Image (cartoon, rainbow, N blue to C red):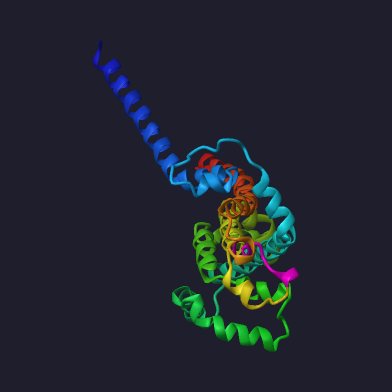
Amino acid sequence: MTSMEAKQRQTRLLSIAFQAFCILLGLVLMAPVIYCVLCSFMQESEIVSTDLHLWPDGFYLGNYIAVITQTKIFRFMLNSFIVAFVSSLARVVTSCLAAYAFTFFNFRGKNLLFLLVLGTMIVPAEMLMVQNYFTTGELGLINTYAGMMIIYLVSGANIFLIRQNFMNYPKDVRDAALVDGCGSLRFFWRILLPMSGPVLATVFISSFVNVWTTYLWPLMVTNKEEMRTVQVVITMLNSSELNSLYGQVMAAAVVILIPSIAVFVLFQRRITAGLMAGAVKG
């Protein structure tokens, strides 16, 4: 065997070992989710048994039937989807506009304003929860979608992320576009945004998942059952009225997880395509 063949064989073995390690690590990280799915198909006696059950004796669908019939899970999912989708879309819009101004425009107090935006990233959301509640109440937004979304419409972290992405594009590109008769708004809409697809998709995904999993704020600003969000289903299933059936809790968690996974898978293709296109342009 020549030295070249030995080196290729060693490289191949290292590649196989690395891929096996990645697969093993992925399985370890996904183990809780996998076990949650399996528990959702178990009867309560299997879950609370002293013997460990890693696989259901039979795929029991009673947990899903109970979740659908005993809770308004689809109504709650609709509420959560409206709040998460509109909030995420608003975050993308506000973050893009603010980042565009901070990147391409020069105005008095620009650096100070940007420092204030960065400062909002270190303020705990819990510290402002009570004041935000009183403000929302004074605006008459209790038990409304607007009240649930109002604190999620702008994000300093997203502004910072998109600004850093915009700074990769030379200002000469915008100046050349303006010379050719392309206005600021047209340059922003026709040139800058299409080139920033990956970061916009990332902001939308992270915002959607973050708002979808939020529990405390929607619970504070709503007191009508028809306005509750999907996370309340878990609380209802843990209540004494339903005897805290763990199989039903797991089934509800699986149903709640489906939209987040669907959004991630859908936009993952967009991110991959954008990164591939950027790599080709080099």
| Residue occupying the far top of the picture | 1
Indicate yes or no whether the magenta region holds residue 103.
no
Question: Number of numbered discs present?
Answer: 0
Task: Residue at 67% x, 48% y: name it.
Answer: 64
Residue 76, percent from left and from top: 71, 62
Q: Is residue 226 magenta?
A: yes
Q: Nearer the viewer, residue 62 or 213?
A: 62
Q: Is residue 97 visible?
A: yes
Residue 241 vertical position relative to residue 259 in the rendered view, above or below:
below
Choose top left, top right, bottom left or bottom right for residue 154. Answer: bottom right
- x, y percentage for residue 245? 58, 55
> Residue 116 appears at what percent x and percent y?
48, 79
- In this view, 28 is above or below 167: above
Position of residue 29 measured from the top left corner of the image (x, y, whole percent): 43, 46
Residue 183 visible in the current orientation: no
Residue at image position (71%, 49%) is 65
Main SS of residues in magenta: helix
Q: Nearer the viewer, residue 42 or 21?
A: 42
- The part of the chain drawn in magenta is 225-237
Q: Residue visible at 25% across and 10% down?
A: 1
Q: What residue do we see at 57% from left, 60% from top?
A: 244
